[in-house]
């Protein structure tokens, strides 16, 4: 069952990744950077938190079980990914 769910999620993710450009064709007056910025704001900040709060029973308890070294390395990796994305673009 888990294998099938993984396949379904990969196909769904790939489909959504392929459809990301549809709004770009509908908003002719906006620059691509503005569309990308709004999409990133929703995808990286506004959408994940409600999903986590809805699906994780006790988020504070979950975070408290993560070792500090792992927690800080994940944060550092996210910062490095963001900086790399900014400089790549």
Image: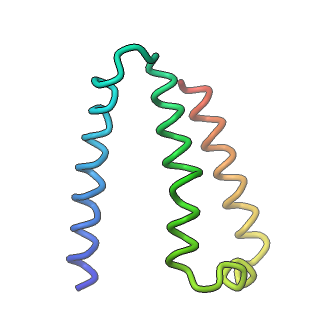
From this view, report whether residue 55 is shown above or below residue 74. below
From this view, report whether residue 40 is shown above or below residue 27. below
Instruction: Tell me if 87 is positioned left or right of 72 in this view.
Output: left
Q: Please count the marks in the image.
A: 0
Q: Nearer the viewer, residue 36 or 75?
A: 36
x, y percentage for residue 37? Answer: 53, 32
Residue extending furthest toward the right? 68
Q: Quadrant of the N terminus?
A: bottom left
From this view, report whether residue 66 is shown above or below residue 10. below
x, y percentage for residue 33? Answer: 50, 22
x, y percentage for residue 48? Answer: 53, 60
Protein image colouring: rainbow
Q: Residue at x 29, y 25 (%)?
A: 26
Q: Residue at x 53, y 24 (%)?
A: 89
Q: Residue at x 46, y 28 (%)?
A: 35
From this view, report whether residue 19 is shown above or below residue 35. below
Quadrant in which residue 3 is drawn: bottom left
Q: Residue at x 67, y 43 (%)?
A: 80
Q: Nearer the viewer, residue 6 or 25?
A: 25
Instruction: Tell me if 20 is positioned left or right of 71 in this view.
Output: left
Q: Nearer the viewer, residue 2 or 49?
A: 49
């Amino acid at each position: 069952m888990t294998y099938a769910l993984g396949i379904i999620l990969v196909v769904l993710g790939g489909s959504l990744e392929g459809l990301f450009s549809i709004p770009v064709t509908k908003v002719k007056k906006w620059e691509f950077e503005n569309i990308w910025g709004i999409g990133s704001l929703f995808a990286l900040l506004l959408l994940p938190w409600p999903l986590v709060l809805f699906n994780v029973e006790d988020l504070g308890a979950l975070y408290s079980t993560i070792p500090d070294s792992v927690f800080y390395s994940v944060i550092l990796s996210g910062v490095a990914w963001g900086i790399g994305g900014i400089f790549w673009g």
